[in-house]
Amino acid sequence: MSIQTNRLGDPAVRAFVSAVNSHDRDAFQALLTPDVTMSDEGSDRDVEDWTEREIFSSNGHMDVESEADGGRTLVVSYRNDTWGEMRTKWQFTVDGGKISRFETGQA
């Protein structure tokens, strides 16, 4: 059973999930600090390259299964056209209402 996006605890994370699921690049970019960083499976990646490949050009979609840490840690059933569906964990660092880092990997 998934958690409705509008019920997620952290406003920045809620907006992140909403932007991913609606494939809204502009809204997504507006959520990130200028110096945002991210990692996938423990390796730092180029945010723009990774998000284009793993989210936007491959129709990424997040179904949130659970949240912790005030909404800044999510367990997500994530799917895209490249990899299909997988259970992933997402952790977010939020500064001043914007996301300055996110980390993802298999849950």
Image (cartoon, grey):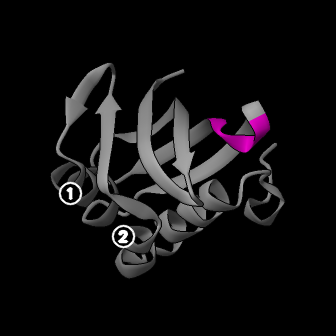
* Numbered circle sitting on residue 88: none
98 horizontally vs 71: left or right: left
Image disc number at residue 29: 2
Q: Is residue 70 visible?
A: yes
Query: Label 2's element?
Result: helix
Above or below 95: residue 42: above
Alpha-carbon span between mark 1 and mark 2 = 9 Å
Q: Is residue 73 magenta?
A: yes
Query: Is disc 2 surrounded by few (<14), some (14 to 19) or many (20+) residues within 10 Å?
Result: some
The residue range painted magenta reads 70-74
The residue at the point 83 percent across, 59 percent down is 7
Q: Quadrant of the C terminus?
A: top right
Q: Which residue is mark 1?
A: 48
Residue type beneath disc 1: Glu
Q: Is residue 4 magenta?
A: no
Query: In the image, is residue 53 above or below residue 101?
Result: below
| Disc 1 and disc 2 in contact, CB within 8 angstroms | no
> Would you identify the image quadrant in which residue 34 lies?
bottom left
Which amino acid is tagged 2? Gln
Label located before the other in sequence (1 or 2): 2
Percent x, y of residue 82: 27, 47
In the rendered structure, the answer to whether residue 103 lies left or right of residue 83 reads right
Q: In the rendering, at what x and y percent does residue 14 appear?
A: 66, 60
Q: Quick one: SS at disc 1?
A: helix
